[in-house]
Amino acid sequence: MPASSAYTVHRHSYGDDESQYGELYLPAGDRRPGTVVVIHGGFWKARYGAEWGAPLAADLAVRGWAAWNLEYRRVGNGGGWPATLTDVAAGIDALADLQASAGLDTGRVVALGHSAGGHLAAWAAGRPVLPADAVGAAPRVRLTGVIAQAGVLDLARGAADQLGSGAVPALLGGMPADRPERYRLASPREQLPVPVRCLHARDDDVVPFSQSADYVAAARAAGADAGLVEVPGGHFGVIDPAAPAWQAALDLLPDLLDG
């Protein structure tokens, strides 16, 4: 685990699979209110793991926020429908079990997700309105905000556009016409949770800018609290702690967490 005089890192499992764990980054000094759940991207594929979220969690801890760098099963190591969504739900709910021992503030929890992680973060925010028998319904820990960094927020459009060389149908087991109920339950476009802040670069050549722009337009039309911040740096600038796009995410957190 990474170490620093500014924070400590503790690994906790929320299931028996080797991918069912999170890394809890705790500031060594005074903490700011709230907890940030970091959800990495990688088109839900097994070859991309929690190491992508670790630099962000570390930077958040240095700045005083408790951060939960969440790992989950992905396509190729037991993930896909419904395991990936089940894991993200269980991993966020695990914060309730850590609340007392780690002194976590679970009354204000923001999920910060990149790319496919942006999808998972926005989906998780909509869990309270899912049907009672749906994957991820009845959350123990409710998200109070989302920062989606270049998120895949419209799964049907992502499938049609063949994002990630067919990553969306690989996650859900088929195209929208084949699995309409899965797309309905898994797509943030169907849930429109609030508040959501989207960060996206127009020159993103991995996930189109329209994924965020169209989501925010639809959310606002439905009366939801959503906003879009255009940032530089392509698809990966948002997860570079030294880049301006990461600073844009940091600038959003106080309003979402500090109260």
Image: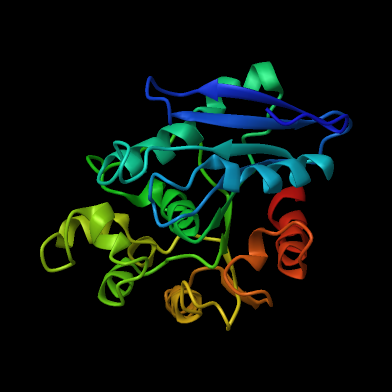
- The residue drawn where x is 49% and y is 52% is 121
Please say if 125 is above or below 230: above
Please say if 155 is above or below 145: below
Q: Residue 186, how many percent across, how many down? A: 31, 55
- The residue drawn where x is 69% and y is 21% is 102
Residue 75 can be seen, yes or no: yes
Judge left or right: residue 240 versus residue 159.
right
Q: Residue 78, how many percent across, how many down? A: 29, 36
Residue farthest to the top, as pictured: 101
* Quarter the N terminus occupies: top right
- The residue drawn where x is 33% and y is 64% is 190
Residue farthest to the left, as pictured: 178
Q: Nearer the viewer, residue 202 or 49?
A: 49
Q: Residue 197, how many percent across, how many down? A: 60, 66
Q: How many marks?
A: 0
Judge left or right: residue 93 versus residue 244.
left
- The image quarter containing residue 252 is bottom right
Residue 137 can be seen, yes or no: no
- The residue drawn where x is 42% and y is 74% is 222
Judge left or right: residue 220 versus residue 110.
left
- The image quarter containing residue 138 is top left
Q: Nearer the viewer, residue 8 or 258?
A: 8
